[in-house]
């Protein structure tokens, strides 16, 4: 199980890192949200690491707010 947890953690880091290479802000927020979602999963796999979970759920919420608001 430990190896799977590490893979999820690395995938989450890669997702967040790749999001900052996006030129389009909407794409950035979508890719970043996927990375954050993986970090939430990673936090759960670490026996509920609440700092990881809460931070990334908050970032997903911010991303969703900006993705769904009317211009």
Image (cartoon, helix red, strand yellow):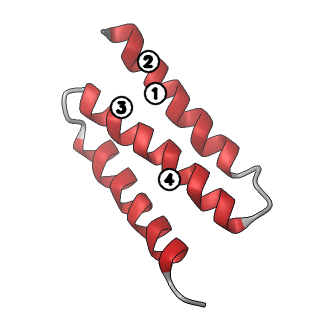
Question: Element type at marker 3?
Answer: helix
In primary-sequence order, the first of circles 4 and 3 is 4
Question: Element type at marker 2?
Answer: helix
Task: Check disc 1 and report the residue beneath it.
Answer: 9
In primary-sequence order, the first of circles 3 and 2 is 2
- Name the disc covering residue 33, or none: 4
Name of the residue lying farthest toward the right: 23
Per the model, the C-alpha gap separating discs 2 and 1 is: 5 Å
Question: Element type at marker 1?
Answer: helix
In primary-sequence order, the first of circles 3 and 1 is 1
Q: Does residue 34 lie above or below 65 as drawn?
A: above
Task: Check disc 2 and report the residue beneath it.
Answer: 6
Per the model, the C-alpha gap separating discs 2 and 4 is: 19 Å
Image spot of residue 57 (x, y percent) = 34, 55
Image spot of residue 52 (x, y percent) = 34, 43
Per the model, the C-alpha gap separating discs 3 and 1 is: 6 Å
Q: Does residue 16 lie above or below 25 as drawn?
A: above
- Pick the quarter of the image with the N terminus: top left
Task: Check disc 3 and report the residue beneath it.
Answer: 42
In primary-sequence order, the first of circles 2 and 4 is 2
Dots 2 and 4: beta carbons under 8 Å?
A: no
Per the model, the C-alpha gap separating discs 4 and 3 is: 14 Å
Dots 1 and 4: beta carbons under 8 Å?
A: no
Dots 3 and 1: beta carbons under 8 Å?
A: yes
Question: Element type at marker 4?
Answer: helix
């Amino acid at each position: 199980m430990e190896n799977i947890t590490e893979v999820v953690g690395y995938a989450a880091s890669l997702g967040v890192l790749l999001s900052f290479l996006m030129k389009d802000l909407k794409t950035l927020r979508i890719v970043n949200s996927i990375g954050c979602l993986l970090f939430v999963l990673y936090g759960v796999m670490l026996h509920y690491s609440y700092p990881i979970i809460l931070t990334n759920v908050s970032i997903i919420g911010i991303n969703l707010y900006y993705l769904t608001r009317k211009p």
